[in-house]
Image: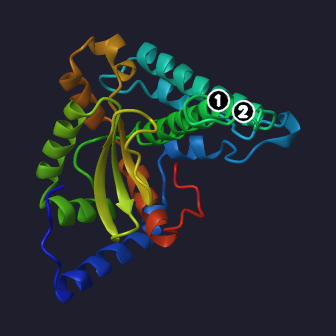
Amino acid sequence: MTNEVKPSQSELSRRDVLFMGAITASTLLTSNTISKAASQPSSPDTSAGTDPYVAKDFSVLLSKKLEGLSQSQLNQHIKLYQGYVKKANEIHHKLKEVDLASANATYSPLRELLAEQSYALNGAIYHEYYFGNLGGKGGEATGDIRAALDECFGSFSKFNDYLKAAGKSMRGWVIVGYNTRIGRIDTFGLDLHNVFSPANVVPVLVLDVYEHAYMIDYGIDRVKYLDAFMQNIDWEAANKRLSLAVKSPCCLVDPVV
């Protein structure tokens, strides 16, 4: 984002009112996609074993027949996500037994496991945000997220252009999130799951621009994929995330779905 002029007291008041409005009961209503995913456990199921991470069920997206995203594309993408969850669990267990005496910043088993832990876990979580904000009717945003985007970008049209340009610029992800440090919507781009990932930012809308997200359907034509993504955004999911982020900025509540 470009440098901003320090807001006046009146602008701060207007922003405060904007985000207080995000905590309305209407934003707590979710779509069928959100209800389906939210029914999956976010905490470990001790009856099924000792793995700390449980993959969420996004199979409902396959039955929705999303415009511009084939079942084959979505099915392979979901399998890739499940692989990240599996690896995050595997690394978690290996870290309990790793040799601490050999710790070294150039190379050591501990260093490699710690680095790849963030890659696997972020890969799982960002995919959960991504799948969780698919399955809607797309089009222009509604509710408090629309007001927040208008406040940040000036208009939804400008946001639309910005998101697509960011999607063409990054190699991994575009994160539209609630920046708890400044109390407003902000955007970030990631080249890898664990590279450029912002702290104190709660994702509200997540766009996956890795080739695996679109190559089955579009080859290397990312622009067509970005158009398809915009047609399938679930703005109710974004509204719920914004509400939770404003209400619990320390992320005490799981805002993924």
Q: Which colour scheme is used?
A: rainbow
Name the residue located 40 percent from the left edge and 37 percent from the top edge.
Answer: 134
Q: What element carries label 1?
A: loop
For the image shown, how many numbered marks are present on the structure? 2
> Relative to residue 213, is residue 60 drawn left or right?
right
| Image location (x, y in percent) of residue 166 | 21, 39
| Image location (x, y in percent) of residue 94 | 75, 31
Residue 236 visible here: no
Quadrant in which the N terminus appears: bottom left
Name the residue located 45 percent from the left edge and 35 percent from the top edge.
Answer: 193
- According to the picture, the residue beneath numbered tag 1 turns out to be 108
Q: Which mark is residue 207?
A: none
> Relative to residue 163, is residue 177 drawn left or right?
right
Towards the viewer: 137 or 103? 103
In the displayed structure, would residue 133 be above or below residue 89?
below
Discs 2, 1 touching: Cβ within 8 Å: yes
Towards the viewer: 61 or 129? 129
Tag 1: residue type? Ser
Residue 191 visible here: yes
- How far is the residue under mark 2 from the one under mark 1? 6 Å
| Image location (x, y in percent) of residue 24 | 43, 72
> Relative to residue 190, is residue 244 drawn left or right?
right
| Image location (x, y in percent) of residue 161 | 13, 43
**Residue found at the very far right of the displayed protein:** 47
